[in-house]
Image (cartoon, helix red, strand yellow):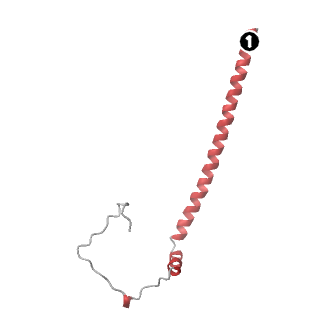
Amino acid sequence: MHCLCAADKFNGRAYLSQVGQVVTANHQLQDIRNEQAALERQNQDLVDTVAQEQSPAYIVGQVQKMGLKPVDSKNLWILQVPHLQEIDKSNQSIQP
């Protein structure tokens, strides 16, 4: 009978330990899900911002705020540069 009681105590501790681990794991999972939801909202906000800032109306508004105006074709000069090579667009380390 003495062994049975010791075994019961051991099983009870093991059970409580497992319950504690499950509670901790569930808490971590909920934290991860909350973080994921926040990141998804942040991503959608960024997608919306990029879409807005790429719209022609937004670009025109920003250009006008900078004081730029459409070019009058009568005042447009075109320069030709001999031996000019186009920059490879796949090389992202080169920025204009």
48 relative to 23 in the view: left or right: left
Q: In which quarter of the image is the C terminus?
A: bottom left
**Above or below: residue 72 compared with residue 13:** below
Mark count:
1
Residue at image location 67% in from the left, 36% down from the top? 24
Please give the name of the residue rendered at 47% of the width and 82% of the height, measured from the top-left corner: 68
Q: 43 above or below 58?
A: above
Residue 22 percent location from the top left of the image: 67, 33
The picture places residue 15, in percent across and down from the top left corner, at: 70, 25
Q: Residue furthest bottom?
A: 74
Q: Which residue lies furthest to the top in this view?
A: 1
Q: In which quarter of the image is the N terminus?
A: top right
Q: Name the residue under label 1.
A: 4
The x and y percentages for residue 11 are 70, 20
Q: What element carries label 1?
A: helix
**Residue type for callout 1:** Leu
Q: Quadrant of residue 5?
A: top right
